[in-house]
Image (cartoon, rainbow, N blue to C red):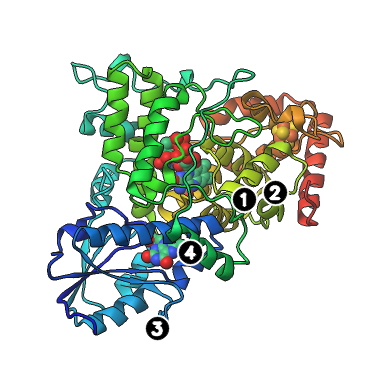
Amino acid sequence: MVARSSRLGLVLGDQLSFDLASLAALDPARDTLLMAEVQAEASYVPHHPQKIVLIFSAMRHFAQALRERGWRVQYVELEEPGNTGTIVGELRRWQQALGCDEIHLTECGEWRLEQALREAELPLVWHPDTRFLCSRGAFARWAQGRTQLRMEHFYRGMRKRCGLLLAADGGPAGGAWNFDSDNRKALPRGLRGPFALQFAVDDITAAVISLVSRRFTDHYGALEGFSYPVTHAQAEQLWQHFLDFGLAAFGDYQDAMAEDQPYLFHARISAALNIGLLDVRRLCQDVEHAWRDGRVPLNAAEGFIRQLIGWREYVHGIYWLRMPEYATLNHLGSQRALPDFYWTGRTRMRCMAQAIGQTLRLGYAHHIQRLMVTGNFALLAGVLPAAICEWYLAVYLDAFDWVELPNTLGMVMHADGGFLGSKPYCASGRYIQRMSDHCKACAYDVRQVTEEQACPFNALYWHFVIRHRQQLAGNPRLHLVYRSLDGMPAARREAVWARGEQLLAQLDAGAAL
Ligand code: FAD
Ligand code: DLZ
Ligand code: SF4
């Protein structure tokens, strides 16, 4: 027998927050919450197996925590008989079974699911996702009438609005809004980031790992080694660990990459934050306190806060401003299939093998690996934006469309024509050499461009610059690049182009490079 209830509340796998707006509108004494593991959400892209473990385990732990707080939770496990396999199907089933006349839910992270829900004939009562500091409406108001949207302008407004890192006169602490020029240091030889905190697998997670090992055998990525936080308390531990040991050097080495150091001084909190185990307001306050108490330098505190209230809120705003047409953009007309080695890590390019290898092992790569290694390669090789977007959405524990899509389609692929970023982040192997120690261990030679063993990034970079001259040459931020292309002797330019053509033909033939 199921108890009758007048209202149903939906809690999705990335809405595991006690202060979710829809929960605040419901009454634990009368209403029922629905949480459902469904095949459609677990397979709309081939999610990394550890991502499915994270979501299901965190959902099961959250359901338990809600019950302890007095909520009635209808929890549907993936293999439960009667599971319809979709969120809409489960809502319909439980609305009828419980006789609910209202379904309360919070705005979704992904347009795809929100659209499916809005199209379903269900008595839905929507609530805004107040876990973001800038609502969809506030972002649209900020964007209105601007000819250009720039993260830097948005970010300054957010600093003022949130009262973060401000001087007594209301200006920026330290006299500048931005310490980016201090935050591009290569890692000194021998310096290592703090040890990575590991979280033990409890009975709930073990049961989910067993489920995923049976049901998602065709998804790429390792299932063994899962050690990510699945509860609020564990996420808090991860955060405190970063505050104590990572944050102080975060700014300096934000852009650095190193052999066999997947995390360096990065916080590793994105997945926990995106599914609701951490609260962005709290994180920012903690960082501000750490700086005011003298525990971390200003360039670290500012660099970190910029990621959270700048980039994170900005891409969220852009996503909801421009969906669904944003996902279809392809300004540069890129059409190439995604090379197979993105799914296996089997390539002689050391930087790519390291970034992809750790991605398959851990479901994690830090920002510069995503932007300047795997992203840069996809941009230079002219991969179809939809194909590389699907890859990013599948392989990272923190990946949800609202954050993955603008970063990949906009920032990496320049497929929105510069709406999100003012120029493509294209770079040759020299950038990777400067910011990492990968080139020393690579089969290719980063100093060469046209030779057989030349770093593929080099010729592909010039090939990209040449083939997109029409779209990019007018961009003031690329004037120097085109000036140096034009200064190249014609024979050299032809040799570079030929080597680029040869590499692209190899990719088209399915070679691993
Ligand atoms: P840190 O380097 O310690 O940064 C702290 C926090 O800042 C992150 O946890 C994250 O919440 C936020 N942040 C930093 N940069 C960004 C950014 N560009 N956009 C949004 N938030 C940011 N992040 C995701 O959360 N999910 C994604 O699916 C995702 N896809 C990406 C795809 C590409 C192609 C690129 C270039 C970046 C993507 N990012 C994504 C942003 C960024 O790479 C990750 O947030 C970061 O690597 C997570 O690791 P961390 O927690 O150690 O971050
Ligand atoms: C990512 C994910 C996965 C793998 N599985 C589920 C699930 O079974 N049930 C659920 O409620 N949510 C899941 N999620 C998260 C959703 O995909 C996410 O809530 C949507 O993409 C909307 O943001
Ligand atoms: Fe990457 Fe080129 Fe350096 Fe090899 S030489 S690690 S391919 S940048």
Label 1 crowding class (10 Å Cα cut-off): few <14, some 14-19, many 20+? Answer: many
Q: CA distance from mark 1 to mark 4?
A: 22 Å
Residue 345's tag is 2
Disc 1 or disc 4, which is closer to the eye?
4
Check disc 1 and give the amino acid type.
Answer: Leu
Residues at circles 1 and 2 in contact by the CB criterion of under 8 Å: yes
- Amino acid type shown at disc 4: Ala
Label 1 to label 3: alpha-carbon separation:
33 Å
- Kindly identify the residue that appears in the image at 48 percent across and 64 percent down: 207
Q: Secondary structure at mark 1?
A: helix
Residue placed under numbered mark 1 in the picture = 360
Three-letter amino acid code at the position of disc 3:
Gly
The local secondary structure at tag 2 comes to: loop
Location of residue 13 in the rendering, given as x and y in whole percent from the top left corner: 37, 60
Task: Please tell me which of labels 4 and 3 falls first in the chain.
Answer: 3
Distance (Cα) linking label 2 and label 4: 29 Å
Q: Is residue 326 left or right of residue 24?
A: right
User: Disc 4 on helix, strand or loop?
Assistant: helix
What residue is at 47 percent from the left and 18 percent from the top? 182
Instruction: Look at the image and tell me in which quarter the N terminus lies.
Output: bottom left
Q: Earlier in the sequence, mark 3 or mark 2?
A: 3
Give the camera-side residue of 506 and 341. Answer: 341
Disc on res. 82 = 3
Q: Position of residue 419 (x, y in %)?
A: 44, 44
Q: Nearer the viewer, mark 1 or mark 3?
A: 3
Q: Which residue is mark 4?
A: 207
Q: CA distance from mark 1 to mark 2?
A: 8 Å
Query: Which of the four quarters of the rendered structure image does ligand 3 lie in?
Result: top right
